[in-house]
Image (spheres, rainbow, N blue to C red):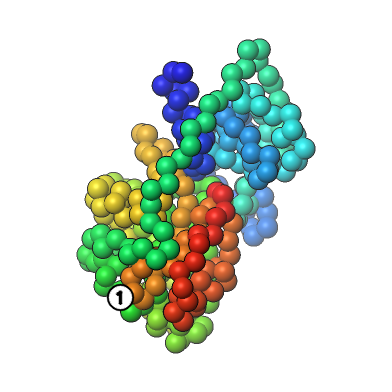
Amino acid sequence: MGKALLSLAVLTAIALVACRKPEARKSAGPSGVEKPYPFKGVVVSVDRSREKVTVKHEAVPGYMDAMTMPFAVAEPKILEDLKPGDTIEAKLLVGDRSSHLEGIVISRPSGTTSVETIPAPGNYGKPGDAAPATTLVDQEGKTFSLRDFKGQVVAVTFIFTRCPLPDFCPRMNLNFSEVERLLAADPKLYGATQLLSVSFDPAHDTPAVLKAFRDPFLKGVPGVVPGHWRFATGTLDEIKEFAGFFGLTYLKTGDQFVHSLATAVIAPDGKLSSIRRGNDWEAKELVEDLKKAAAGAKPHAAAHTAP
């Protein structure tokens, strides 16, 4: 197997999300309005159970550069015919909080080769394990670690500010914004909790960039204390150590990031209480996780949702 094919196989197998610096693009439009973009690429893998297809696609004019990532499909029946190696053309519809492919047309070259899959590693923290005390730096340029929040419940997620598709990092940001609003409405719970969004793109996401990115999410929310939701980053080694505990996998190739999604809750004693993988969760569910951890509930098995 060639290096390029092996690389694609690894990324496919561990169900990663590919994100890359987008071109300057227009807004997706008013809430509820989906903006269409022409889309063309080669199928890498097909997940019929989740109604998704991973595509190595060409640049999407006016929206984003070429990359490899999974897409939801509006017509699941077509997944019965799709195979790795197929070339497809479709319409990419992008809304405020989701995106999907519609009107897929398949072209199948002769001699199509299947992509071999390789099992993903699973050596990371489990509920009940002590969370890492890695030193990070927040949007104000201040260094800290999870130890500084001992006695509080902390929700941790991972993002990078240039992630283009609304299903992934932008959804994590909107979810955390809603969590912040829900917590602020309950002063007692608000005072017992902390939100933390960690960027794995330290070269671009400096403290100043993170502060400018975070502040709009806090506007108009009554009762918000700016330090309650921190955005942070660190050195490459620090982020690798910290993110690795939570099972986050990410890879940078040029401007491209291929990454998984992980959102965790750390109990007041500094131990991992729960973790949600993927993007299929709502703010109110994370708030319930925070309430349970604050009440001293036992750590529970990870909630798993694929990205």
- In the rendered view, tell whether residue 8 sits above or below residue 16: above
**Residue drawn where x is 33% and y is 79% of the image:** 151
Mark 1: secondary structure: loop
Image location of residue 114, percent across then percent down: 59, 23
- In the rendered view, tell whether residue 62 sits above or below residue 274: above
Farthest residue, direction bottom:
188
Name the residue nearer the viewer: 44 or 94: 44
Can I make out residue 64 in this image? no
The amino acid beneath tag 1 is: Lys
Q: Is residue 34 left or right of residue 23?
A: right
Residue topped by disc 1? 150
**Residue drawn where x is 48% and y is 32% of the image:** 118
**Residue drawn where x is 52% and y is 35% of the image:** 12
Farthest residue, direction top:
110
Q: Is residue 192 left or right of residue 28?
A: left
The number of discs equals 1
Image location of residue 21, percent across then percent down: 43, 41
Quadrant of the rendered image containing residue 288: bottom right
Image location of residue 197, percent across then percent down: 39, 61
Can I make out residue 300 in this image? yes
